[in-house]
Image (cartoon, rainbow, N blue to C red):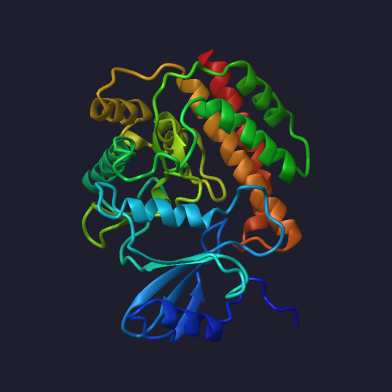
Amino acid sequence: MTKNVHTLDVQVLDEYLKSEIDDFKGILESKKFNTGQSNPTYLLNSGEKKYVLRKKPPGKLLPSAHAVDREYRVMKALSNSSVPVPKMLHLCEDDSIIGTIFYLMEFVEGRIFWDPTLPEVNKEQRREIYEETNKTLAALHQIDIKKLNLENFGKPGNYFERQVNRWIQQYRAAETSQYSEVESLIVWLEKNMPKDDGMVSIVHGDYRLYNMIFDPKETQILAVLDWELSTLGHPYADLAYQCMSWYVPKIGITPGLLDADTIMLGIPSEEEYVKSYCQKMGISSIPNWSFYLAFGFFRLAGIAQGVYKRSLQGNASADNAQDIGAIVPILGKIAMSIIHKNN
């Protein structure tokens, strides 16, 4: 029988964590979360406490991907800020312990909403939840980078130019088929690059509803998760990435709001959501909005293509990884429709 590539050596891990963390009582149970397409994530139960371990996947990886050490660093820096994150406990950069580098953090008990239509809550709570995500995003983008010693967390300036080039490289490295919609999108992004306006903030990189833990009963965010793609960059990238939900139908791992009656549900429109963000940031509007949306869709296509490529190699983290390849051309098509509509 072939060993699962994501199986942990619990005995070795147990001994290591006991030697590194003062009050760690040992691992009674280890369970891999089925969700998460990039870095394998595990729930560790010591009986008294629960922990979450997040590691790089095994095997050959795309350049600069799966940066769990960066995740640890940014969450550690944000620990006493206006942006809620889990408490970071330990970063292990020694591959010999469990095969790849990993970090350990405290488990946060709460709710994760996978469907942006929020069927679990009522109309009033839906509006409150979206306002909470909006408030937290604006708070992140107003964090004092120097105060948190994150000046070298990324390269300031020309963010979109660098990111477009990077994701073209990532996409090409993971490419398994050629899609005309994605090729057209790449050409358009390169030709329509907005001028750098000098705005720099911490960007999350994957700021979406299912990467947040909410209070079990209230609409408060207890922790923002999955900082793998975080860096210093342009705040509009995060906003546009979340706003992609309003353009996406309910497909695969990207359930969207396109076909939903948002007024009836109590969910703000994209225009209302952007306006609320602008008010918090002290700006009047966002020019070149279609570019930021189109870039978000291309980056998501690059991520999906990487997940699919890893599934073919046998080291994907999630069980449904092979299904994700079909989403790539759909994302390209949605992006091109936004471009044609607004230009």
59 or 148: nearer the eye?
Answer: 148
Quarter of the picture holding the C terminus: top right
Q: Is residue 98 left or right of residue 231?
A: right
- Could you tell me which residue is drawn at 74 percent across and 78 percent down? 2
In the rendering, at what x and y percent does residue 85 appear?
Answer: 33, 55
Q: Nearer the viewer, residue 206 or 249?
A: 206
Q: Quadrant of the N terminus?
A: bottom right
27 on left or right of 166: left
Left or right? Give the position of 171 relative to 135.
Answer: right
Give coordinates of residue 120: x percent, y percent. 32, 56
The answer to whether 61 is drawn above or below residue 134 in the figure is below
Res 258 seen here:
no
Where in the figure is residue 135, as x and y percent of width and height?
26, 39
Counting labels gives 0
Relative depth, front residue between 16 and 303: 16
Which residue lies at the image location 63% right of the left edge and 41% below the top edge?
Answer: 302
Q: Residue 176: name its quadrant.
A: top right
The reply to whether residue 339 is in sight is: yes
Q: Position of residue 307 (x, y in %)?
A: 64, 52
Q: Is residue 134 above or below residue 323?
A: above
Residue, far top: 343
Compared to residue 308, the image places residue 58 above or below, namely below
Residue in the foreground of this view, choosing between 67 and 123: 67
Left or right: 175 as drawn, with respect to 124: right
Residue at the spot x=67%, y=41% of the render? Answer: 170
